[in-house]
Amino acid sequence: MLSKSQELFERAQSFIPGGVNSPARAFKSVGGTPVFFKKAKGSKITDVDGNEYIDFVGSWGPMIIGHAHPAVVKAVQDASFNSTSFGAPTEIEIKMAQLVQGMVPNVEKVRMVNSGTEACMSAIRVARGYTGKDKVIKFEGNYHGHGDSFLIKAGSGALTLGSPSSPGVTEGTAKDTLIADYNSLESVEKLLNENEGNVAAIILEPVAGNMGCIPPVEGFLEGLRKLCDAHDVVLIFDEVMTGFRLSRGGAQERYQVWADLVTFGKVIGGGLPVGAFGGRKEIMAVVAPEGPVYQAGTLSGNPLAMHAGFTQLSILDRHPEYYVELEEKAEFLAKRLRAVLNQHGVRYHMNQVGSMMSIFFTDTEVIDFNTANQTDQEFFRKFFHEMLKRGIYLPPSPFESWFLATTHTEEMLDNTIVAADDALGAIKPRD
Ligand SMILES: *Cc1c(COP(=O)(O)O)cnc(C)c1O
């Protein structure tokens, strides 16, 4: 008999491309049927068949204080009675901008958008408009949403020009995106020298989370800051995943390196569709209507989204101890998982920064796209499904970060370790 999830997935595929509204949900990298959910509370998530899981996806990051936090739910409910949208300014937008500025001091001015994708697309347009230059450097394996300029992979051979990584992206767009290697200042310097005077911005995930969790090596962020200053390039930190997660002030505060522009998403919206980009006043001054760089949105600064985001951020702002607790939980989980993996003789490399972590099934240290790609995907696939069977919902891809929430209890983490021990016992070890 088909499970309800299987039934829904079949139905979904008749009406929605691939049955999902975003490809990462489709279980392509792990196989099987995506789980359809109906409700969640804290870090417990319940599927349409009534199975309960401990959730380490957290909607891919936003749910840092758990699902359906009572204050966030109430804020959305209350706001909805006064209309779900005006398309005109409201006071909550000012409160939100002020709160973001208070938590991330170098974001002197901020513009709200509806997704991380929009935030990153807009940030590079602003950088180009501000500098009058065209090219942008990004890092292989970093994700900045699905804007055309970012769906570019390294060109083949000696060519430094990028090439489209998706049909529908033109060669014309690709030629303005240059691809560097993560954690390699050398690769950046080379591109800057070859394209002297033509690079508007360097954009990166200050801690990579979209090729699994990969922290910056010592000196990498500082080095980029120096290179940007020397070459008159706008440094953009894409903190869509790390913002308000790795600390109150995100990766910038954690590493004490300050970008010129910063993009946000995920945590900033408390689970509603919110993105934002902001930074130095004189750069943000080019944004319309203050300046000539066009950027707009009918639903930008939407009242429900702003109330949800403002409420979640206020809670984080008032509870700096949450970040200490999140880190302790992640370290506890990582330490116990290491013990279990060692016990089972699994070869792995684990990366953990704050409440983000990933296990790579490989012998080598994972510092960039190439080393991440050496992970044994087949082993991950088995591990994922054995964990799922035991009530642990991990990101359905070896190239995603697991996220801890304040609502993960010690008992949940204990249960996760027991499940991992059991799961690894059920999988034949790698040769
Ligand atoms: C998720 C993510 C994005 C895209 O955000 P969406 O809201 O999915 O458009 C961009 N950058 C990073 C670092 C992300 O993790």
Image: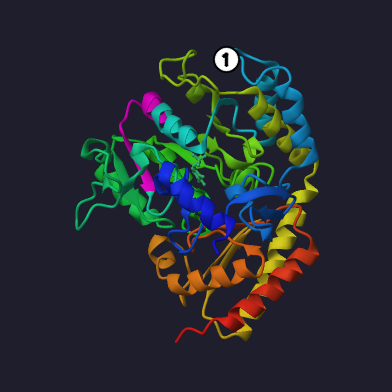
Return the residue nearer the eye: 137 or 43: 43
Q: Is residue 284 magenta?
A: no
Q: Which of the pair 92/383 is nearer the observer?
A: 383
Percent x, y of residue 13: 43, 48
Residue most toward the front? 1
The colour scheme applied to this rendered structure is rainbow
Which residue sits at x=40%, y=60%? 369
Which range of residues does the magenta coloring cover? 127-138
Amino acid type, callout 1: Gly
Is 408 situated left or right of 246 in this image?
Answer: right
Visible residue check, residue 376: no
Element under disc 1: loop
356 relative to 155 in the view: left or right: right
Q: Which residue is mark 1?
A: 87
Measured from the top left, where is residue 279 in percent x and y? Answer: 54, 30
Q: Residue at x 60, y 33 (%)?
A: 106
Quarter occupied by the N terminus: bottom right
Residue at 66% x, 27% y is 304
Q: Residues within 10 Å of mark 1 (few under 14, many from 20)?
A: few
